[in-house]
Image (cartoon, helix red, strand yellow):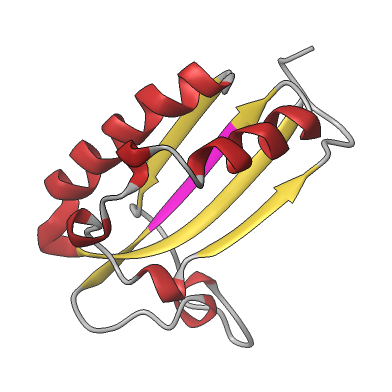
Amino acid sequence: MYIAGFVIPVPADRLEAYRTWAEKGAEIFREYGCIEIVESWEDNVPDGKQTDFRRAVDVKRGEQIVFSWQMWPDWASVDAAEKKMRTDKRFDVSGEIPFDLKRLIYGCFEPIYTLGRK
């Protein structure tokens, strides 16, 4: 199992646009071998004293946090998917992205412990 994680600032009034955009992308990621995707809209994200999700992505007034992760079989699957994305015309959607792509945080992680999954 391999995890790709995201923290994304999304304008609050773009929730449905984001959901639609994420659903379209999820269909393609599944084709590429993604096992699971979770898109989570901010519900209880407290401000920290030193750092927090909002400061990490420089949230602007009227934006909410999306916390998202993708579960892949392994790093090789993610690497292969990223290479395919570069030439897949379905990812040529720059005008449709409902958030500021420059402030998205992305990282990949090798799980060291899981509860409830094998």
Q: Image quadrant for the N terminus? A: top right
> Is residue 78 located in the magenta-colored stretch of the structure?
no
Q: Position of residue 44 (x, y in %)?
A: 39, 56
Rendered view: 49 above or below 99: below
The residue at 40%/26% (across/down) is 28
Q: Main secondary structure of the magenta part?
A: strand
Q: Based on the displayed image, in which of its 4 quarters is residue 89 positioned? A: top left
Q: Is residue 5 left or right of residue 8?
A: right
x and y percent of residue 27 in the render?
Answer: 36, 23
- In the rendered image, the vertical position of residue 30 relative to residue 107, given as above or below: above
What is the quadrant of the C terminus in the image? top right
- Residue at image location 13% in from the left, 44% down from the top: 16
Is 65 on the left or on the right of 67, as rendered? left
The vertical placement of 35 against 72, above or below, is: above
* Range covered by the magenta-colored residues: 66-70
Q: Nearer the viewer, residue 113 or 20?
A: 20
Extreme residue toward the right, this view:
112
Horizontal side, residue 83 vs residue 15: left or right: right
Quarter-wise, where is residue 115 in the image? top right
Q: Nearer the viewer, residue 12 or 4?
A: 4
